[in-house]
Amino acid sequence: MERANATSLEGFILMGVSDHPQLERVFFVVILFSYLLTLVGNGTIILLSSLDARLHTPMYFFLSNLSSLDLAFTTSSVPQMLVNLWGSDKTISYGGCVTQLYVFLWLGATECILLVVMAFDRYVAVCWPLHYTAVMNPRLCWLLAAIAWLGGLGNSGVQSTFTVQLPLCGNRRLDSFLCEVPAMIKMACGDTSLNEAVLNGVCTFFTAVPLSIILVSYCCIARAVLEIHSAEGRRKAFNTCLSHLLVVLLFYGSAIYGYLLPAKTSSQDQGKFISLFYSVVTPMANPLIYTLRNKEVKGALRRLLGKGREVS
């Protein structure tokens, strides 16, 4: 009991790349640059979706939700990563670790559900274009967004509560960049079979099931796109759907690898770099994917910058 209390008081040591100190500065620069791009990219999408009337549509409502989520997702972990990579102090308080665990799981599960909602929006837009406005009304959009955020919160409540009850036996060395379930299961000293079962069950529900739904919806979308007679119409539908599909593959691919592999048997180095990928790289890539292939977003940005030059 005394050793467990000591862990609670002293917190944890996030190892990161401490075994390779020569890489810490490199990782610091790369992660800082990625974080700044994430802030600028996602902040720009939120700003454009709010200010430009042409983007007041369900698609951009959900996209601004995704950008808000990505901002919170990275901010819940990256600043602590940067502090630990820059200095000699690698610790995180027990309260800070638990908070990071709850928030990270909440936002990660929310993104899983939100990507399904965005796939449904694209399905209605392509397969039922004449009924799109009636189906995707503001009330339904707010309801779907609320389900995503509350569903993620419920997932966090289950997984995080099971995880914080793990017997740590005074072990403070967390071989990861952040406090997350697989790394904490590996750190535990007792029987973790129940935790692994809960982890695999919940993660299967929040990753494999939504991904299957998304892929089925895109099969229907692909069939509908091929039936569009206009080449311009096919190209526009293909571009908007491809952006979302790329985001889906990036997020779900890394999440499945990081959370559905057996927690005790997967390589720790692989696991922590995969967690770095979905906590840093994916939120940075999302706004780039959506803006580089989206004429409406680029047009809104040009209009905003044009107004700024007119005012000045």
Image (tube, rainbow, N blue to C red):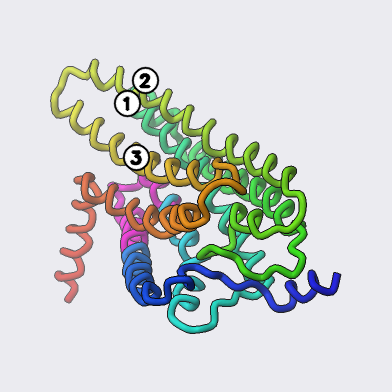
Q: Earlier in the sequence, mark 3 or mark 1?
A: 1
What residue is at 69 percent from the left and 42 percent from the top?
198
Q: Nearer the viewer, mark 2 or mark 1?
A: 2
Query: As displayed, is residue 124 above or below residue 242?
Result: above
Q: Nearer the viewer, residue 161 or 65?
A: 161
Left or right placement of residue 310 versus residue 84 in this view: left
Element marked by disc 1: helix
Amino acid on which disc 2 is placed: Cys
What residue is at 56 percent from the left and 39 percent from the top?
206
**Residue 209 sits in quarter:** top right
Amino acid on which disc 1 is placed: Val
Q: Which mark is residue 220?
A: 2
Q: Which mark is residue 126?
A: 1
Residue farthest toward the right in the current orientation of the protein? 1
What residue is at 66 percent from the left and 60 percent from the top?
187
**Residue 301 sits in quarter:** bottom left
Left or right placement of residue 123 versus residue 12 in this view: left
Is residue 51 rendered magenta in the image? yes
Q: Quadrant of the N terminus?
A: bottom right
Pointer 3 residue: 244
